[in-house]
Every structure is written in structure tokens, then in C-alpha cells.
Image: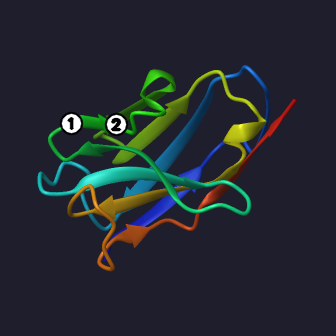
């Protein structure tokens, strides 16, 4: 069974670029029919889909975040990463990685436990 684990910087300052990493075990990120996705949840708000990279390496981004977001992968390490530039306190929240069979959320999705990102002003 697939497992996903996020890691990130925790506390950062405004204007920085942050990098979050999702380490995958029990499944290959090159499996062509999966989308390896990033979702975040600001405090007191709902889930926000940020983007994904497919098993073939194609990337997809939320229009509202596209200009600041980059998703990439390291197939040797079976990891995929999220870079978010020019962060502000509005980017504070819990960041999740997930495996999806489409770009839509499904009960069959596999999720990591999430990692907290706090942006100070």
C-alpha cells in the first residue's frame, strides 16, 4: 500500500521561496495513470488544490497560484516537490501531498499526514 510523507521548512519569512517534498513508498511516482498532487488548507478554511504532476511528468497548476508554483519530481528518490515563491502570511496553512487517479478528489485518494507551514511578516 502506498504511503506519502511531507517535509518542509516549518517557519519561514515573507518573500522567501519554500520547497516542500513528498516522499512516496509502496508505489512508483512514474505510474502513468496517477496524479501526484499538492493540496493546502489555511487555518479556518477549506482545502485548496494547488497542482499536480502526472506519472508521465506533465504538470498542472491552479490558475490562482500558477505564477508562483512549480512542481517537479526526482524519480530516482521517488519524490516530488512543491516550490512556492514570494510567500506571505496568506500562504500559512497545512500542506498535503496526495495520490489521485484524476485531478478530482476521490475517496480512493491516498494522503500524507500534512506539514505545517507558517509565514511570518
Q: Residues within 10 Å of mark 2 (few under 14, many from 20)?
A: many
The foreground one among 32 and 15 is 15
Question: Can you say whether 50 is above or below 39 in the image?
Answer: above
Q: Which quadrant is the C terminus positioned in?
A: top right
Q: Which mark, by number, is residue 80?
A: none
| Residue linked to disc 2 | 73
Residue shown at 45% from the left, 39% from the top: 81
Question: Can you say whether 88 is above or below 91 in the image?
Answer: above
Q: Which mark, by number, is residue 57?
A: 1
The spot of residue 46 in percent (x, y) is 58, 62
User: Sequence order check: which comes first, mark 2 or mark 1?
Assistant: 1
Residue shown at 48% from the left, 32% from the top: 65
The spot of residue 58 in percent (x, y) is 20, 35
Secondary structure category for the residue under label 1: loop
Q: Which quadrant is the N terminus positioned in?
A: bottom left
Residue shown at 15% from the left, 54% from the top: 31
The foreground one among 20 and 74 is 20
Question: Can you say whether 119 is above or below 29 in the image?
Answer: above
* Residue 18 as seen in the image, left or right of residue 43: left
* Residue 65 as seen in the image, left or right of residue 35: right
Question: Can you say whether 72 is above or below 34 in the image?
Answer: above
Q: CA distance from mark 2 to mark 1?
A: 8 Å
- Marks 2,1: beta carbons within 8 A: yes
Amino acid at each position: 500500500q502506498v504511503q506519502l510523507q511531507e517535509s518542509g521548512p516549518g517557519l519561514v519569512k515573507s518573500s522567501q521561496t519554500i520547497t516542500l517534498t513528498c516522499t512516496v513508498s509502496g508505489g512508483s511516482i512514474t505510474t502513468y495513470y496517477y496524479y501526484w498532487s499538492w493540496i493546502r488548507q489555511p487555518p479556518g478554511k477549506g482545502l485548496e488544490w494547488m497542482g499536480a504532476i502526472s506519472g508521465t511528468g506533465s504538470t498542472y497548476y491552479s490558475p490562482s497560484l500558477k505564477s508562483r508554483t512549480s512542481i517537479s519530481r526526482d524519480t530516482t528518490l521517488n519524490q516530488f516537490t512543491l516550490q512556492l515563491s514570494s510567500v506571505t502570511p496568506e500562504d500559512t496553512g497545512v500542506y498535503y501531498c496526495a495520490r489521485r487517479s484524476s485531478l478530482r478528489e476521490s475517496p480512493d485518494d491516498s494522503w500524507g499526514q500534512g506539514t505545517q507551514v507558517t509565514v511570518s511578516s
